[in-house]
Amino acid sequence: MAENVTPISRAISDVLTGAYARKRLTQDQIAAKVDMSPVTLQKKLRGRSPITATDLVILARAIGVDPASVLNDAIEDVATAERQKSEGVASIADQRRKKTPAEMTDDELEAFEGESAANTDPEMGHDEPEAP
């Protein structure tokens, strides 16, 4: 992502993306309404290019939502993410970044050794015997 894209800009893009999806609009339809290239619109809605105040108003109106509501929802989303971060709750982005077993170091794998939800019985405290 571009360095100059702020968390609020990313949150606005998320809110706008949800709004146009709920209204069953396509990015091409929106791009045509606002006279913006589809590539530029895609960058903005994917959080790779900043959304200015002007962009917010133009895009929200093209989608048929109130720009102030979009901004309020985005601010709330950022505040919630910051609160969860301070409380130690992993964000969706952090959860997506979790390593697969193939990416883990030996020490990380050892931390999970013997803990498989598929074959551990919590009442027994150890792996269940093989099924017949």
Image (cartoon, helix red, strand yellow):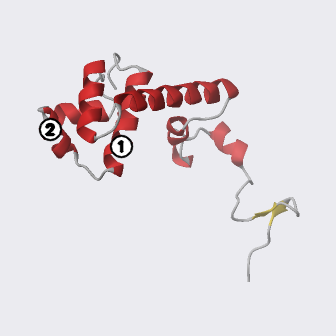
Q: x%, y% of residue 36? A: 14, 31
- Residue at the spot x=44%, y=23% of the render? 7
- Residue at the spot x=26%, y=34% of the render? 61
Determine contact: label 2, label 1, CB under 8 Å: no
Q: Can residue 57 be seen in this view?
A: yes
Task: Inspect the image, locate mark 1, and give the three-letter code of the amino acid beneath it.
Answer: Ala
Choose top left, top right, bottom left or bottom right for residue 43.
Answer: top left
Task: Inspect the image, locate mark 2, and give the three-letter code of the amino acid beneath it.
Answer: Lys
Residue 82 horizontal side relative to residue 132, left or right: left
Q: Can residue 52 be seen in this view?
A: no
- In this rendering, is residue 40 above or below 54? below
Label 2 crowd (10 A; few <14 / some 14-19 / many >=20): some
**For mark 2, what is the residue?**
33
- In this rendering, is residue 100 above or below 122? above
Q: x%, y% of residue 80? A: 58, 30
Q: Earlier in the sequence, mark 2 or mark 1?
A: 1
